[in-house]
Every structure is written in C-alpha cells, then in structure tokens.
Amino acid sequence: MRTAAVAGAAAPLAAGAASHEITALAPSPLYASLGVKPVINGVGVVTVLGGSIMPPEVVRAMEEAGRFFIPLLELERKVGARLAELLRAPAAMVTCGAASAITVGTAACLSQGDAAKLRQLPGRDGIRYEVIQQKTHRSGYEHQMELCGAKVVTVETRAELDAAINERTGMMFFLNKAEHDGNIKAEDWVKVGRERGVPTMNDAASDATPKENLWKYTKLGFDLVIFSGGKALRGPQASGLLLGRKDLIEASYPAMSPYGGIGRGMKVGKEELCGLLAAVELYLKADHAAEWKRLEARVATIRGALKGARGVKTERHIPVIANEVPHVVVNWDEAALGMTSQQVQERLMKGEPSIHVQRPGEGKLLISVWMMRGDEPRITGGRLREIFGA
Ligand SMILES: *Cc1c(COP(=O)(O)O)cnc(C)c1O
C-alpha cells in the first residue's frame, strides 16, 4: 500500500459534510421486509456496498425532480452546462456511472462525432477502433470500451506507445490511480495524444478527493475525464460524470440513452440528473477541512480501541490518488496470534451488525472510516478489541 507523503489536518478533503446520521443499527422496515441487513461500511465508497449515502439535499433534489415531466434532452444539456461551469471543464455530461462514461466516451472517440459511424458501433469497418493503454493501467473496465468494438492494445514504454499509434488508433486510455505504476505519466500521455491527434481519456472514478482533482485533469489536458457520481461526490449511486472537450461531449450524448445505439441501456433519469448536480454543488461548498478532522477522529477511535492489544499494531494510512482520505491499517503476525486476516474479516462480517473491511494481505486489515456514521467507528473498534482479546 502506498501512503501519501503529505497528509495532516491541513490537507483539504473529503465529502459532503452533511450525511444522514442513520447507521447500520437503525431499524429499516424496508430492508427488513426484503431480508437484507444493513452493514457497517468499513470498506469505503464501493459499488458493492451501495456506493455512498446521499445527503438530504440530494435526496430532496431527486424527489422534486421526480414530481414533474420535463423535456429530458433539454434537462440533460442544462445540467451538463451547469456542471461544466462548476467543474471548470469545457463541457460536461451526466452518465449512469463512471463505467458508462467510459463506454459513451469511447463511442464518441471511435466515431469522431460522425453519426453514421456511431450507429455502426461495435462494427469496426472504417472505424479507428484501437485503444491504447499501459499494461499497469489495466482497470478491469476494459469491457466498457470493448463493447464499442474497441480493441485494447497494451504498451509498457514510451517507445512502445510511439510505435503503437497508427491510423487505427481511436483513443488513449489512462487509469488515474495507476499514475505511479506506469512508465508513462499523465503529462506525457496527454502530450503524446496531442502531438499524434489521438483523444485521451482519464478514468478518475474514485479520485474526487481533494476536490481540486475535479478540474485538475481537464486542466492537465485530458480530452475526457471521468468521475463516479456515487462515490466521493455522494450523488445518486447510478450516476457518473464525463467531463472534457466540447466536441467529444457533444459526440457522447447521442451514444447514450435516450438515443438508440450503443448506450441505450445506460439511462440517466431526471432524478439522477438533478441529484448529481445537487451533490456536486454541495460537495464544492462543503467544509472539507472539517470533514477531514472528523475522519481523523474516527481513525483515532479505532486505533485507540486496539491500544494495548498484544501483538497488534495499527497505523494511519492515506492511499495515494484514489480514496485519498485517512484509513486504519491493523497489522499482526498470523502465526503468533493464531488468526488469519481472513478469519478476522469473517468474524467482523458475521457479527451483529455486520462490519465489512478489506483484507489487503496476511495479518493485515484495511479499514476505511470514510463512510462510517454515528457510533460505527466505536462499534468497529470495540469488535476488533474483542476479537484480538485486548
Ligand atoms: C468505481 C470505478 C469505476 C466504476 O464506477 P461506477 O460509477 O460504479 O460505474 C470505474 N473505474 C474506476 C477506476 C473505479 O474506481
């Protein structure tokens, strides 16, 4: 795990200050009726636990949006224009998630704004269908490009990149959080794209902290930049942001619902449009320094609970680029304590309420306090203390 060199209370950060103080312990007749139990989220903003929690302002915007009929295409454009202004991007649009932004953005790059070519996708005839990415930037979201007919070509060095670009190259994909893992850094990726006339896409889905990142990558020169709406921004879980060049955003709209074609199944409703806009407005106004302090306090609570536990060490950890907020790492010698990290993870999960954390390796747990609420850090610390017999 890479830890950010600079941290501390002065660092700007994190999400909408106001979050529902409803916790995993609160009764939920709805989830109870479905037989689904809310959990304490010690993993962070991940899709499989429900993304993030929308602040009341966002819920209200969705509710109001849902009470009227409106010309949807007009709403899309108006919300897009407002987002572009707020996020200092040439243009913006709402997608139904970061993954869908990858697809519609790829479709725009491959079809180069030509409606006939867009209709033809995933067919490759006359299409610049090759997408170049660095091997270390494999994201697991390659399918989102391939469904446009793209063929992903991987490179490792600058020389390989230069040689890989040809008349079939339609896009150069960059995985933002892999910046430190690849030979070719963001600035050079952008520079090569510019020089060779190939549009560049940066998937920064989980990287909206600090908030300046929301305009950092478009300023850096990426033609398209992607963020999840349901992660740090605390918008609707099924929303995403595609930011960037005007002509490419223009070309992206017809790739998405309600137009027919490659992205017809990727619908963005009036509720998501208005919800994500409200979330972004709130996020930009939020007191990120105060939020950061709250996260530090939660980290201290969990670490404090494990103080004195024999054979257990804790540390504060701030991941680099993606999810750049304070976490807790718990370390122990599996053999010495007779407990594997898998066993501890399972015990946390099987408890009441269930606590979900990550297990990055042997004798190691990674706990995100970002999405915890109310008493959840104390409950999590207490459970760990019980398990480790402090
Ligand atoms: C979460 C994530 C996605 C997918 O985001 P959704 O909003 O769930 O579609 C894509 N790329 C990266 C790097 C992510 O972290």
Image (cartoon, helix red, strand yellow):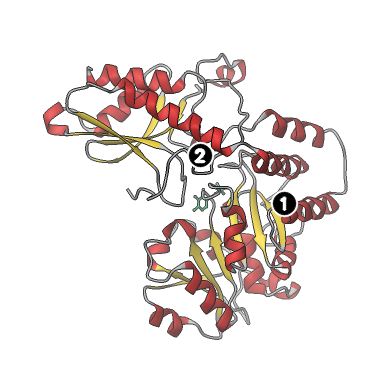
Closer mark to the observer between disc 2 and disc 1:
1
Give the x, y percent position of residue 297: 44, 27
Confirm or deny contact between disc 2 and disc 1 (CB under 8 A).
Answer: no
In the displayed structure, 175 sits above or below 336; it is below
Q: Which residue lies furthest to the front in this view?
A: 10
Give the x, y percent position of residue 265: 67, 52
Residue type pointed to by label 2: Val
Tell which of 293 and 207 is nearer to you: 293
In the rendered image, which quarter is residue 352 located in?
A: top left
The answer to whether any part of residue 284 appears in the image is yes
324 lies left or right of 263: left
Q: Residue at x 68, y 54 (%)?
A: 87
Q: Residue at x 46, y 41 (%)?
A: 325
Image disc number at residue 119? none
Quadrant housing the C terminus: top left
In the displayed structure, 193 sits above or below 279; it is below
Secondary-structure class at tag 1: helix
Q: Residue at x 46, y 49 (%)?
A: 322
Tell which of 385 and 50 is nearer to you: 385
In the displayed structure, 190 sits above or below 271; it is below
Task: Report the Cα–Cα distance between label 2 and label 1.
Answer: 23 Å
Give the x, y percent position of residue 56: 69, 28
Residue type pointed to by label 1: Leu
The answer to whether any part of residue 50 appears in the image is no
Q: Under 8 Å from ligand 1: the CB of mark 2?
A: yes
Q: Residue at x 47, y 18 (%)?
A: 375
- CA neighbours of label 2 inside 10 A, class few (<14), some (14 to 19), many (20+): many
Q: Mark 1 points at which residue?
A: 86
Q: Mark 2 points at which residue?
A: 45
Q: Which residue lies furthest to the left in this view?
A: 336
- CA neighbours of label 1 inside 10 A, class few (<14), some (14 to 19), many (20+): some
